Image: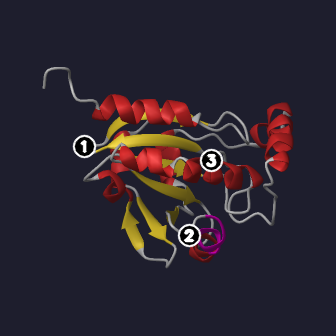
Amino acid sequence: MDTKALGTATVLDAAGEQVRLADQWSEHPAVIVWLRHFGCVFCREQVAEIRASRGDIEARGAGIAFIGNGTARSAAWFQKRFAPDSTVLTDPDLVSYRAIGARSGLASTLGPAAWGAGIRAFRSGARQTMTKGHAYQQGGLVVVAPGNKVLYRHISRAAGDHAPVPDVLAALEAATAIPVGA
């Protein structure tokens, strides 16, 4: 993972304004979730999982941001519909995706691993809509602390491969733990 490139990456907010990605973790840890694209059934499922744990994440002193790769208009649509109380950004040039080492390709999008995840997502109530970004892009999740310190990293091997939320919480807990006797 290229933490230097990640720390200098510029993305867009839902209004189309440029944002330095590292501002998300400059003062406190942040859980940054890279979505496949804004119409993705798996991404909606993952956003719901992360938002359900928002209280636990924030209790550990961290913020949350979701990054897609469509237009700023698509980011605004996604934010309004699926993450109204969250930061939603977009990286249409995929700079931050490359920095985290995210995968892309037909096999990781439509292969056997994606079918099982698709059934799981459908059962959870998530539905696919029109592709709003790069169709074959995979996502990931990185927990980053001030100073570009990576606390946890999960790069999706296939569509629907999400970071386990307990692992994310454990990484935040380990980073914020106060030593015994302190």
Q: Quick check: marks 2 and 1 in contact, CB under 8 Å?
A: no
- Element type where label 2 sits in the image: loop
Q: Quadrant of the C terminus?
A: top left
Specify the label residue 95 is tagged with. Answer: none
Q: Position of residue 141 (x, y in %)?
A: 53, 42
Residue projecting furthest to the front: 181
Residue marked by disc 3: 49
Q: Residue at x 56, y 70 (%)?
A: 84
Q: Amino acid at mark 1?
A: Gly
| Mark 3 and mark 1: Cα distance apart in space | 27 Å
What is the span of residues highlighted in magenta in the rendered image? 77-82
**What's the amino acid at mark 3?**
Glu
Q: Is residue 90 magenta?
A: no
Q: Is residue 110 visible?
A: no
Quadrant location, the N terminus: top left
Q: Label 2 sits on what residue type?
A: Pro
Relative depth, front residue between 131 and 143:
143
Write down the residue under mark 2: 84
* Residue 11 appears anywhere in the view: yes
Q: Which residue is mark 1?
A: 147
Q: Is residue 97 left or right of residue 19?
A: right
Q: Residue sitting at 41 percent across and 31 percent down? A: 171
Mark positioned earlier in the residue sequence (2 or 1): 2
